[in-house]
Amino acid sequence: MRFAWRVALAALAVAAAVAHAAQPLHEWGGKPTPPLALRDLSGRSVDLRNLRGHVVLVNFWATWCEPCIAEMPSIARLRAQLAGKPFDVLAVNYGESPGKIEGFLRKRKLDLPVLLDPDQAAADAWGAKGLPMSFLVDAGGKVRYWAFGERDWTDAGSMKTVEGLLAEGAHARR
């Protein structure tokens, strides 16, 4: 019986490692960027169009989503590592109340700009059929990459992609 438990635990460990592996970034394919204009937790209107000139990570998430919870600290680290650069994060919450979101952020000591999508209309427009779903928008306002599932946004591949988009934006501004 102990052998069966060890095999089961080993299988679970392998499954967890595979699930935690970075989900690939997929090219968007030239489709138009969906609109994104929502209110933040303070009630201010935020429109993606006003962030032109910045690379933006748009992340659809919810407090009940385990992969979202696991991914959010890496999003916060990425934001902190790129502080002072033309980079923004828009964490779009999937239909939850501001109070629930604020409690979640406070409990986990996360400092992220959260937009409210109470009727999930933005998630539908962006094709976020599961969570977490993330999109990288270039400085010109075009979605370039998307990923479904948890990823470490500070791993080498993610950093290379984001820094490449930042370099493109800097080159375009010259």
Image: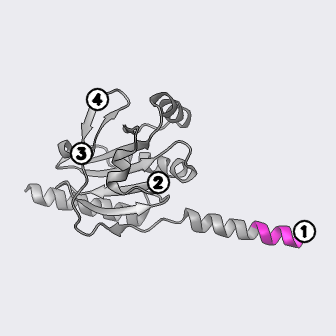
Disc nearer the start of the sequence (2/4): 4
Q: Which residue is mark 3?
A: 48
Q: Residues within 10 Å of mark 3 (few under 14, many from 20)?
A: some
The picture quadrant where one finds residue 159 is bottom left
* Relative image position of residue 9 (x, y in whole percent): 77, 66
* Relative image position of residue 94 (x, y in whole percent): 44, 44
User: In the rendered structure, are the residues bearing label 3 and label 2 in contact, judged by CB atoms less than 8 Å apart?
Assistant: no
Q: Which residue is mark 1?
A: 2
Find numbered disc 1 in the image and state the secondary structure of the residue it sits on.
Answer: helix
Disc nearer the start of the sequence (3/2): 3
Disc nearer the start of the sequence (1/4): 1
Mark 1 or mark 4, whichever is nearer to me: 4
Front in this rendered view, residue 63 or 9 = 63
* Relative image position of residue 144 (x, y in whole percent): 27, 63
Whether the magenta-drawn stretch holds residue 34 is answered as no
Residue stretch in magenta: 1-9
